[in-house]
Image: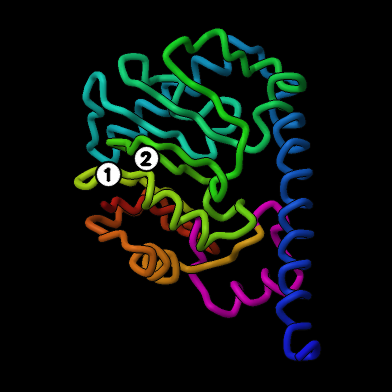
Amino acid sequence: MANSQQPTANSHLMSSIKWKLAQYLEIRWWQRYLRNKPVEEYLTWKRNYWHGFLEKIKLEVPENATVIDAGCGPAGIFTILEEQQVTAIDPLLDRYAVEIPHFDKNLYPNVQFHTAGLEDWTSKEQFDYIFCINAINHVNDIKAAAKNLKQLLKPGGNLILSIDTHNYSFLKWIFKLIPGDALHPHQMDLEEYVSLLNEVGFKVNERICLDKGVVFGYWVVVGG
């Protein structure tokens, strides 16, 4: 019995180590990336980026809609959702507040911030929209995270998930083995992401390619 359980225990341990490494690298990445960027200049650029993102996917979020920004980072789409009721979730929010001057909760009075992983945060309420942008492949347990997002979405609501997806299977396996991208513990192609969403109960309605790329494609998947 002990021998049969050993591979599972080792798998969980390796997954936890990879996720902790990814979180360490994530905060370091933000610190380096934002080091020489003036706060107001960067936030203006980022807000314009988010407006452009919504235009590309042809989405307007109604006023007073309830929204989750899952894996929001220090300057997620919550920065432009001023007329909505927004909940922003990220396991590194407490560190962003101390170590990233570009993140200031006081600028966003309509946003409730929660320091938590996507697998862990729960609510008695369900939400009209869930944005999970460049975040699902950073989590520790990707299936648990996807399942939790499904539980948080209202019936008839919309999940907007953006992801970098592998274009070539052989490169995907190389990245998994090296790993070639330690910031992202999960290396998957588009069909694997869609299968994951289907498995936890989402119905995928749209697949929108924003950048074909060479190694990675950048896709937005819309589901409910």
Identify which residue is drawn at 69% across, 58% down: 181
Write down the quadrant of residue 102 in the picture: top right
- Decide whether residue 96 is among the magenta residues: no
Local crowd size for mark 2, using a 10 Å CA cut-off: few (<14), some (14–19), many (≥20) = many
Task: Give the magenta part as a residue range.
Answer: 164-184
Q: Where residue 65 is drawn, which disc sits there? A: none
Residue type highlighted by circle 2:
Ile
Local crowd size for mark 1, using a 10 Å CA cut-off: few (<14), some (14–19), many (≥20) = many
Picture coordinates of residue 198 (x, y %)?
33, 67
Identify which residue is drawn at 51% across, 54% down: 145
Q: Nearer the viewer, residue 44 or 22?
A: 22
Secondary structure of the residue carrying tag 1 is: strand
Mark 2–mark 1 Cα distance, whole angstroms, equals: 6 Å
Count of numbered circles in the view: 2
Identify which residue is drawn at 77% across, 67% down: 14
Picture coordinates of residue 71 (x, y %)?
54, 39
Badge 2 or badge 1: first in the primary sequence? 2
Residue type highlighted by circle 1:
Asn
Q: Where residue 130 is drawn, which disc sits there? A: 2
Left or right side of 106 for 13: right
Q: Nearer the viewer, residue 83 or 191?
A: 83
Q: Quadrant of the N terminus?
A: bottom right
> Marks 2 and 1: CB-CB under 8 Å?
yes
Picture coordinates of residue 4 (x, y %)?
73, 90
Secondary structure of the residue carrying tag 2 is: strand
- Can you identify the residue that label 1 sits on? 158
